[in-house]
Image: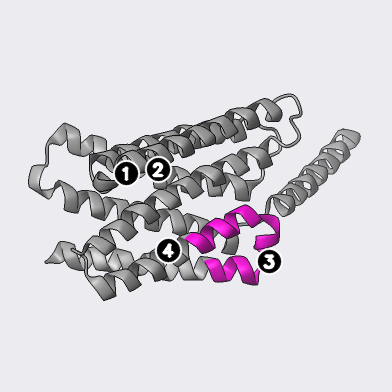
Amino acid sequence: MMASVFAQFLQYSCYAVEACLVIAVVARGQWRKYPEFALFAVGYASIDAILRPIILFHYGQSSLQYRYCYWLSDAALTLGAFLLISLFFRRALAKKKEIWPLLRSILSSVFILITLISAFSISSHYHHLIGDFIVEFQQNLYFTCLVLNTVLYVTLAQMEKVDEDLNLLVCGLGVQFAGPAAVMALIYLTGIGVHAPAFFELCAQACTLATWLTWLYTFTCKRSAESTSTEERKETSAFAKVSMRRLSEV
């Protein structure tokens, strides 16, 4: 009973945070700076907070329509996340003329390969679409996004000039992908058994909420990278002036 109440609390909290984030991105004009993320956020919120609840209300949780809607929309959101990570790579390495073209070809090849495998599998396993294949496909796609997002985070950490907002957006994606993967590993190692699905659902919803809270913090409470760099330059300049003055006095 308590687990069900907590799950509903997490779910509706996610809806509220998703709505707040979309409003913040639009109201603050951040969609101009990050159009790829704004499109992803609007699409994710539309599917998670509008489409799925409507299908659930009309057909019920145990209906075939809701199962198809959930799994297919989940695959669409994961593919959207893959594209978002690719576009973040483009933003981070746009000035690296010797690296970005090669990486763009690699990401395009991976995306085309995933798309072809998905289309072929759907046509070949139409009667078993909601079965072992879709679960395995989702796990492989999640693993791909996790690896790419980790590489992206390491790449940003090694850059001299980093967009702090982009760094936080990538960290949010890391929570979204690394959290469920860690929970699945924990379930496998501990052998929770019959309570594994409910435990995984709670942890996955908590990771989703943490991800959206991180993104909401990015666009509402975090200073932009430009203002931070400006203030740091001012502080460095002031420190240099004080040091020179003391040296002259000596």
Q: Give the numbered dot on residue 124.
A: none
- Mark positioned earlier in the residue sequence (1 or 3): 3
- Say left or right for 84 vs 121: right
Q: Disc 4 designates what residue?
A: 47
Instruction: Report the residue at 52% width, 65% height from top.
Output: 21
Q: Which range of residues does the magenta coloring cover? A: 22-43
Identify the main secondary structure in magenta: helix
Q: Residue 180: which numbered mark, if any?
A: 1
Tell me whether the residue at label 1 lies in contact with that at label 3, contact meaning CB atoms closer than 8 angstroms: no
Give the residue number, with chain letter if any, for mark 2.
Answer: 177
Mark 3 to mark 4 CA distance (whole Å): 23 Å
Disc with the residue nearer the chain's start (3 vs 2): 3
Q: Are marks 3 and 2 in contact (CB under 8 Å)?
A: no
Disc 4 residue type? Ile
Helix, strand or loop for disc 2: helix
Q: Amino acid at mark 2?
A: Phe
**Left or right side of 22 for 45:** left
**Mark 1 or mark 4: whose residue is earlier in sequence:** 4
In the rendered image, the vertical position of residue 63 relative to residue 100, given as above or below: below
Evaluate if marks 1 and 2 touch, with contact meaning CB atoms under 8 Å apart. Answer: yes
Residue 157 visible in the current orientation: no
The residue lying toward the viewer, choosing from 85 and 52, is: 52
| CA distance for labels 1 and 4 | 20 Å
Q: CA distance from mark 2 to mark 4?
A: 18 Å
